[in-house]
Image (cartoon, rainbow, N blue to C red):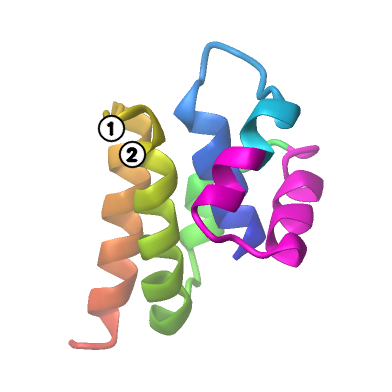
Amino acid sequence: MQRLLAYMVQVAQPEAEVDWDKFVPLLKNLEFNDQLIAGIRVALKVPQSLDLLTEELEPDIAAIALEKAVSIALLDRRVNPQEDQALTKFLDAMKVSEA
């Protein structure tokens, strides 16, 4: 899940590098625990591929990630195209279990 959320952090501002010191308080305000935040930070060191991340994404994990991903996407009160694509893929992964 940390890799999925790291992807959301990366695409939140695709034209700029993530200022981690400014981003941590935002994640804490979203009630992300320290372990999750640390995992996201580690995952940010490696560029993430949305296709690889969602290729075999379990519906249960997608459901949990979707809620947190929406929170990250809305930190700046707008959803950019990359965030929209990721959120759609998470939602699609959830639908797999319904089929």
Q: Position of residue 55 (x, y in %)?
A: 48, 63
Question: Residues under labels 2 and 1: Cα distance?
Answer: 6 Å
Figure check: 23 above or below 18: below
Magenta residues, start to end: 25-46
Label 1 CA crowd tier, 10 Å (few <14, some 14–19, many 20+): some
Residue 69: say if magenta.
Answer: no
Helix, strand or loop at label 1? It is loop
The image's mark for residue 74 is 2
Query: Tag 2: residue type?
Result: Leu
Residue at the bottom extreme, as displayed = 98
Figure check: 35 above or below 40: below
Q: Position of residue 64 (x, y in %)?
A: 43, 73
Question: Counting residues from the N terminus, which is met first, the one under dot 2 or under dot 1?
Answer: 2
Marks 2/1 in contact by CB < 8 Å: the verdict is yes
Residue 80 found in image quarter: top left
The image's mark for residue 42 is none
